[in-house]
Amino acid sequence: MHARVSLFVGVVALVASSALAAENPFAGVQVKVTKVGGNVSVVTGAGGNIGVSAGPDGILIVDDQFAPLAPKIEKAIKPLSKKPLRFVLNTHWHGDHTGGNEAFGKLAPIIAHKNVRLRLEQGTKRGDRTIPPAPPGALPVITYEDGLSIFLNGEEIRVRHLPMAAHTDSDSIVIFTKSKVVHFGDQFTNGVFPFIDLDTGGSVRGYITNLRQLRPTLTDDMTLIPGHGPVGTVKDLDAFIAMLEETSRRVEAGIAAGKTLEQLKQQDVLKGFESWQTDFLNKATFTEILFRDLSRKEAK
Ligand SMILES: [Zn+2]
């Protein structure tokens, strides 16, 4: 249930952040910290799951949800270490993962893939909606192309940009090597359909290729923090990959057979995937995303 709410709030806020902030839909949101493994905890509230490394060197956070939640998040993570916040990472540019950047950027440097900075700096057009540029204080101050490592709290925290654009063209994952925890950003949404941001480079084939390449590097003893949905295991990731492969295979077969989007929706092409639906992304809307994505690539 929580996942549904957070994904919904996330995407709505992406398209109308300033109007929503004025009404403060976050007043009732509870921010909770849960231990995951080793030095790593997860913070849930509204928006993308936040990964936290906390220990003798201080605190590192992966993503920071929405701006109005920053004071609650700060209060929730403070008791985890006697030392201050040291680093902020962004897994991608979306507002439900970077909304707290301006607040946390005052406390510690923000590090992200170069396209996170670019997207935030320039703003984005999505259909007839415009996501305005982020304020300068919300921009990452250290950027990378392929990745980097941060040595903190007794372990290497390895940040890797993914080779294919998948959720967006700015996706990274964060591997806490000793704690055996991986934060996937929205490259993995546990048990729920992912939003695939076709307007900023996303593609379902990118999702599948990235995850297929990553899969052999993951071990059964790892805990996976998804961008949305509950903390999971490699088994949950396998189910996610299988869902992406089967849903895209069905839509692709429909396109190859000359079916229209309306026909595919009418024949319930994603029958059997009911449990993956959220308030924002049901079978019909996920079919639309896959159809637009896969027919666009067919046309090339
Ligand atoms: Zn996202």
Image (cartoon, rainbow, N blue to C red):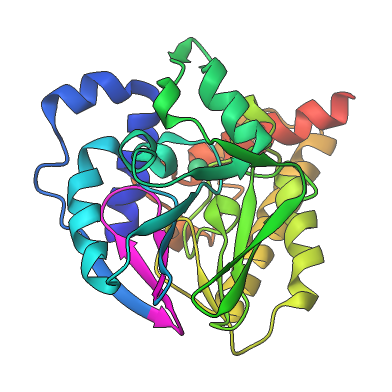
Question: In this image, 85 relative to 18: left or right?
Answer: right
The spot of residue 154 in percent (x, y) is 54, 80
Residue that appears at 59% across and 90% down: 221
Residue 5 shows up from this direction:
yes
Residue that appears at 41% across and 35% down: 95
Q: Magenta residues, as a range? A: 36-55
Can residue 259 be found in the magenta stretch? Answer: no
The spot of residue 237 in percent (x, y) is 60, 71
Residue that appears at 78% across and 46% down: 164
The spot of residue 158 in percent (x, y) is 66, 65
Residue 124 shows up from this direction:
no
Which SS type dominates the magenta stretch?
strand
Question: In this image, 294 relative to 80: left or right?
Answer: right
Q: Is residue 172 above or below residue 33?
A: above
Q: Nearer the viewer, residue 88 or 212?
A: 88
The spot of residue 169 in percent (x, y) is 68, 36
